[in-house]
Amino acid sequence: MGLVILFWLTLLVFWQLPDSRLRVVFCDVGQGDAVLVTWKNYQMLVDGGPDNSVLSCLGKNMAFWDREIELVMLTHPQADHMTGLIEVLERYEVGQLVAANVMNETPEYWQLRKVVLEKGVKVRELVEGDELRVGPVELAVLWPRERGGEPLAWKKAGERQVLGAGTYKGDVNEMSLVLKGSFGQFDFLLTGDVGEKEELELVNQRRLSEVELLKVAHHGSRYSSSQVFLRQVSPEVAVVSVGGRNRFGHPTEAVLDRLVEVGAKVVRTDEKGMVRIVSDGESWWQD
């Protein structure tokens, strides 16, 4: 019996050995965002969705023995992007958290902050022009242009002092991290919840270029995915992370029409469940 168990464990390990392809996985987390980018044993998790359903996605896309996520990114501190990260940080070793220095007066934010401080996770704020690497994947930060301005957001301090720092006075969606990734000839763009105003500024910066894969901003809200922006990035495939029959009416028909107009293949998590895009650095396909 012991030999049989050992045989099947060995077979399972070989089955889960990573190859050299890049995988961009859009987890099915309902009305929220959670994107897992993997290459071999390197992982980057961008947002964690509105609950702990992201854990199932991680279990399906990471080897069972791998309990480390090298980079976790919070695009902005709202519950539909943030809540699932609490359980992720509790259950996995996280090398680094990338997040804006922006506070949000919600229970989810304070719980996440508490776990980050208890675990001693290194936090780094990124702005336009910063660059990262996950294995051979080059990552360029296109937005936000300026820092959040609340340095106590992720630092230890007395609770009264932190609360006295105040929260970001604008819409935190405006501070969403926008990230462009490149793996050989394959480019992808992750957009958080930016709106038309931020998209126009990105276009005017002239840092945008055509990409193969686009994560549609703000779940297909009519206030994002403007025509001028979509024409600039001209994606081959556009993934909408969205919950079925959500109360916001996402994705809107206007956005879907604009995506079709630029020739994008539209894939939705409310219709397909988890979406996995795979690339060898030259071509891409949906797994």
Image (cartoon, grey):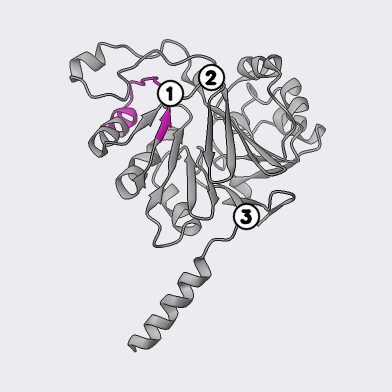
The residue depicted at 44 percent of the width and 47 percent of the height is 54
Upstream in the sequence, badge 3 or badge 1? 3
Alpha carbon separation for disc pair 2 and 3: 29 Å
The residue depicted at 34 percent of the width and 89 percent of the height is 1
> Type of residue at label 1?
Ala
For this view, does 163 lie left or right of residue 283? left
Observer-nearest of 138 and 49 = 138
Alpha carbon separation for disc pair 3 and 1: 30 Å
**Label placed on residue 88:** none
Of tags 2 and 3, the one toward the viewer is 3
Q: Secondary structure at mark 3?
A: loop
Observer-nearest of 188 and 228 = 188
> Mark 3 = which residue?
21
Location of the C terminus by quadrant is bottom right
Which range is magenta?
A: 97-111
> Mark 1 = which residue?
100
**Label placed on residue 144:** 2
Disc 2 crowd rating (10 Å Cα; few below 14, some 14-19, many 20+) is many
